[in-house]
Image (cartoon, helix red, strand yellow):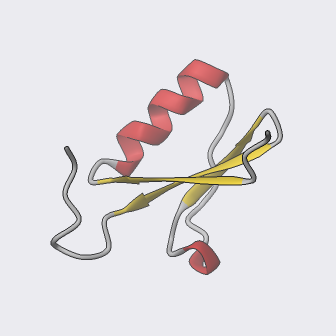
Amino acid sequence: MKIHYLEIISHGVNSVCEAYEKLYKLASGYPDNLLGGARTCVIDGSTIGVVYALVSYETLS
């Protein structure tokens, strides 16, 4: 099964994007307002979006 869109919520969007860029040798895009400001890239045909936590109760574990 192929994933169409995977969203990663992070307080360190730039750090996550830099890690993916180094790991997969690609460039992430500018924030996409249609996806809540997520920075996106395509890996193996799947779109990955990295977005800041939108509300204060979204915590990372």
**Location of residue 35 in the rendering, given as x and y in whole percent from the top left corner:** 59, 73
Q: How many marks?
A: 0
> Vertically, is 47 above or below 51?
above
Q: Residue at x 79, y 41 (%)?
A: 2
Q: Nearer the viewer, residue 49 or 60?
A: 60
> Vertically, is 39 above or below 61?
below
Left or right of 3, for residue 52 = left
Q: Quadrant of residue 45?
A: top right
> Vertically, is 16 above or below 56?
above
Q: Residue furthest right?
A: 45
In the rendered view of the protein, which quadrant contains the N terminus?
Answer: top right
Left or right of 51, for residue 39 = right
**Location of residue 51 in the rendering, given as x and y in whole percent from the top left corner:** 44, 60
Q: Residue at x 61, y 70 (%)?
A: 32
Q: Quadrant of residue 31?
A: bottom right
Q: Residue at x 66, y 39 (%)?
A: 27
Q: Nearer the viewer, residue 54 or 3?
A: 3
Q: Nearer the viewer, residue 27 or 38?
A: 38
Left or right of 13, for residue 41 = right
Left or right of 48, for residue 37 = left
**Location of residue 12 in the rendering, given as x and y in whole percent from the top left corner:** 30, 47
Q: Residue at x 51, y 75 (%)?
A: 36
**Location of residue 23 in the rendering, given as x and y in whole percent from the top left corner:** 57, 20
Q: Nearer the viewer, residue 14 or 11?
A: 11
In the rendered view of the protein, which quadrant contains the C terminus?
Answer: top left
